[in-house]
Amino acid sequence: MAKAKKEGSFEQSLKRLEEIVDKLEDQELELEEAIALFEEGVKLAEACGARLDAAEKKVTLLLKDRQGNLTQAPFASGPGEQEQS
């Protein structure tokens, strides 16, 4: 994907990344084309990762404290990573 093109959505980028993986698994692919696809895939993977990181920072979870009140806490990306208030 050229940088001059408007960035697509996360879903479009992910779909293109899947297409690239499928093409790279084709053993008939010429080396030059495989390298170009690999480079495009790496850039897409980095862009998707950055978008996921940005989205994670925006997400908050509503939690109930011991008194039953709703509180907000940062999104935890894995089990055991969430801080309880």
Image (cartoon, helix red, strand yellow):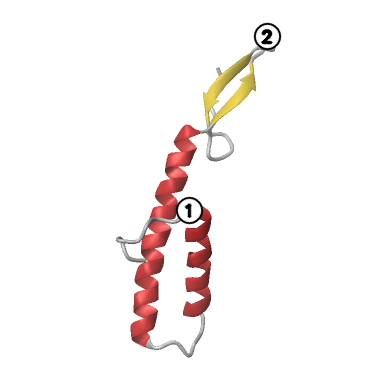
Q: Residue furthest right?
A: 68
Give the SS element for disc 2. Answer: loop
Give the crowd class for mark 2: few <14, some 14-19, many >=20 residues within 10 Å. Answer: few
Relative to 21, say whether 7 is above or below. Answer: above
Amino acid of disc 2: Gln
Q: Nearer the viewer, mark 2 or mark 1?
A: 1
Residue at image mark 2? 67
Nearest the eye: 34 or 66: 34
Residue 71 image offset from top left, x and y in percent = 58, 17
Residue 35 lies, in percent from the top left, at: 35, 78
Where's the C terminus, which quadrant?
Answer: top right
Q: Which residue is mark 1?
A: 9
Q: Amino acid at mark 1?
A: Ser
Q: Is residue 75 above or below residue 44?
A: above
User: Closer to the camera, 84 or 13?
Assistant: 13
**Residue 12 in the figure: left or right of residue 4:** right
Q: Where is 38 relative to 30, above or below? A: above
What's the CA distance linking mark 2 and mark 1? 41 Å
Residue at the far left: name it.
4
